Amino acid sequence: MLKAGNYCRFARRNQVLLKTQRRLWQSSREATKALGRCRQPAALIRVVKSSHSKNLIDGVFCAAALHRLSLLSRQNGDGELAAWKLCYGEAMQHLESFGAQELAVAALAMAKARPPMSKDLLEQLLGRVLPGLHLNSTALPIRYCANLLWATAAIRHEHPLTRALFQEVEVACHQPWRHGRCNARDFSQVCWAFASSGRHMGGLRVIESSAQHQGTILESYSDHDVATTIWAVATMSCPGPQGSGFLERLMEAACEKDFAPQGLSMTFWGLATLAPSIRRATVEQLLAALVPKVLQHAGNLAPQGASNILWAVATLEAQQEPSHGVIALDEGLRLRLVEAVSYSLTQQLQQCNGQDIANALWALANLGIKTDVLFPKVCECFQDLPSHSFSAQNCANILWALVRQDRDLDLRDFAKAIATRASNFSSDWDEQSLSISVWALAVLGQRTSSLPLLKALTSDLEELRKFSSESLSVFAWTCGLLGVETHPTPLLALVINKRADSLTIEHLSSMLIAFARIWPHYKI
């Protein structure tokens, strides 16, 4: 009888515990659902604190809170930073209860919102699955590997764990029997991550090893998957034999897609970048499909997308050599396209950055189209442009465009403003950008601004000897035009004397004219 009594008490105790666990589980589910009803960070803080006091927080709750907060962050509500700190603290305390899905959700939330603690939490999340891409002795499914990789690339955090993640995801793509095969979304995420983080060789190896399988599931690719993958391949360039075959089929599939504005610009840019390395028929087919869609959605293009399309049109036009085998757009269609896209940019000048403006002006100058409204508008309203966002290369491209444009515009004030910005850079110049800038400023009559840039030219004779003949010719021509007898003229004279036998007639004549202007100080 004693044993039977003990058994009954034990059974009743288990029933009580089970009911308690069920109530807690149900309460935890209700708390997680409550997060989805939050419309402000302050409301989310109240839910998290209430759940904490009732001991209802686990990995699922933390991931849901981070995800909801990343959506609320787009509204810039009050208390956002406090909410992030609170959720970060809870996530760190309950990290061990995160499953594979929760790790991926949390990483994506941090990558999209990028709060101050995003890199710290990302390191902790990666530490749960590395090395080995395993969680609790179970191989991490490739979908969650792709999510983590995308988040890592988006946050742009360089860390030993980051490097390990890229290496192990590459291996996982080579060994699909361990982590599974990438579907279209996973593959586009992986390609984007490798391309945007500059790990091009690893990305190309992934494409080469996955191309055969991906080619069999092209029907499952969404417009976003297609655009992202084309952009990534174009960024990394030079795919192998398997990758090239897959790319051709992917571009054929792109002809049937109804792209969103962002996808249109990514695909157009990718087409222009890859055009010399793919079949002419494929280029013509995709170009014919994209242009009407760009005309339809021109007013909805973001500044970056619009400037990239203008760049792509100019790049395709520059490839109209017989050796490339690429046919130019119909002249009337090209004019309509450029005018529509440049007008869209004109309406968004306040949202443009230096790269957007530089790409657009460079493209318009290259195309020689004079009926656009963008060039005159930029020259008229340059004081309102975000000049602080102009890089040295942006300045060089804009100055080049100002020289090349062929229309009756007053460029003096705009050129002076760009020259002032360019003079702020002392060590950020590459050879080509610096040579273009000093040449353009000299042509535009900005002598005062050109001289400081000439001073920025390297004083290292060995480094100067590596410069191309084109750059040496430009620097010498500018020194002669401006009558510069100090640095860099003496070094240029030494290098040119040594390379005289290898210079073309065109370069030699340009240099002779330049040095003749400051004769007899420098003889070559």
Image: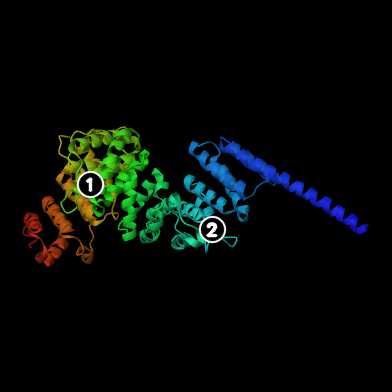
Q: Residues within 10 Å of mark 1 (few under 14, many from 20)?
A: many
Q: Horizontally, is 464 left or right of 108 in the view?
A: left
Residue 19 percent location from the top left of the image: 76, 46
| Numbered tag placed on residue 238 in the rendering | none
Among numbered discs 1 and 2, the one appearing first in the sequence: 2
Residue 446 percent location from the top left of the image: 18, 44
Residue extending furthest toward the right? 1
Q: Amino acid at mark 2?
A: Leu
Find numbered disc 2 in the image and state the secondary structure of the residue it sits on: loop
Q: Residues within 10 Å of mark 2 (few under 14, many from 20)?
A: many
Residue at x 56%, y 35% (from the top left corner): 40
Asked if 92 appears above or below 224 in the picture, the reply is below
Q: Horizontally, is 93 left or right of 411 in the view?
A: right
Asked whether disc 1 touches disc 2, contact meaning CB atoms under 8 Å apart, the reply is no
- Residue 260 falls in image quadrant: top left
> For mark 1, what is the residue?
316
Q: CA distance from mark 1 to mark 2?
A: 43 Å
Asked if 406 appears above or below 497 in the picture, the reply is above
Q: Amino acid at mark 1?
A: Leu
Find numbered disc 1 in the image and state the secondary structure of the residue it sits on: helix
Asked if 239 appears above or below 338 in the picture, the reply is below
- Residue 364 falls in image quadrant: top left
Res 369 visible: no
> For mark 2, what is the residue?
140
From the viewer's side, name the closer residue of 52 and 181.
181
From the viewer's side, name the closer residue of 147 and 74.
147
What quarter of the picture does the C terminus occupy? bottom left
Residue at x 37%, y 47% (from the top left corner): 226
Residue 507 percent location from the top left of the image: 10, 57
How many marks overall?
Answer: 2
Residue 242 percent location from the top left of the image: 34, 59
